[in-house]
Image (tube, grey):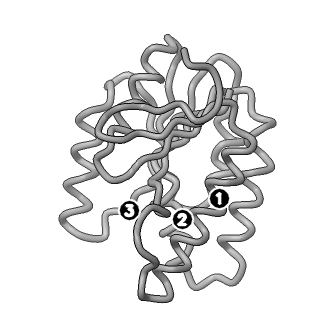
Amino acid sequence: MIQLILGGARSGKSRLAEQTAILSGLPVIYIATAQAWDDEMHQRIEHHQAQRPKEWSLAEEPLYLAERLQQIDQAGQVILIDCLTLWMSNMLMQDVAGLQDNECTKLLQILPKLKSEIILVSNETGLGVVPMGQISRKFVDESGRLHQQLGQIADKVIFCVAGFPMILKGDKA
């Protein structure tokens, strides 16, 4: 099963993803995409680390998500990826032609083939005004395109607002 959990900053999406993983009763591998480029981001990462159960395995993967998923995939486990918008930011900041397009394509191709239960967490970026800067517009556009494509292949899509999940696709349970 593939679940996509979207929401704004501090919407409760990561907490919901973590609770979903715990309730599965399966072993969990947490893939963190964040990179600590400044003190504030370092503190955010520490907060997320403190919230996670100690028995979860951790894989840090800022760029090559599809390859990492292939390496760790197996039946009878949950892979929780938090978060795709940080992953997108990491790719857009690289000076490598075609990296973002190639990696998104690989991710979309591999996800339906995986044996693990997959939970994807991402920030919904399309609810505000159009950003003024070129890189910010590209980020919003590319994140939005990725979310639309993931929504098509996901079994369940949830949007979090103020800590409340709204089921957009899939079973209500």
Callout 2: SS = helix
- Please name the amino acid that badge 1 sits on: Leu
Element type at mark 3: loop
Q: Residues within 10 Å of mark 3 (few under 14, many from 20)?
A: some
Location of residue 110 (image quadrant): top right
Which label's residue is closer to the chain start, 1 or 3?
Answer: 3
> SS of the residue at dot 1?
helix
Question: Which quarter of the picture shows residue 105?
Answer: bottom right
Foreground mark, 3 or 2? 2
Q: Amino acid at mark 3?
A: Gln
Label 1: few (<14), some (14–19) or many (≥20) C-alpha neighbours in 10 Å: some
CB within 8 Å, label 3 to label 2: no
Q: Which residue shows up at 56% across the image and 79% down it?
A: 138
Q: Is residue 55 above or below residue 98?
A: above
At horizontal 22% and vertical 44% (from top left) the residue drawn is: 47
CB atoms of marks 2 and 1 within 8 Å: yes
Quickly name the residue at label 3. 35
Q: Quadrant of the N terminus?
A: top right
Report the residue at 69% width, 37% height from top: 154
Say which residue label 1 marks: 146
Count neighbours of disc 2 (C-alpha within 10 A) and say few if under 14, some if 14 to 19, many if 20 or more.
many
Vertical side of 6 occupied by 74: above or below = above
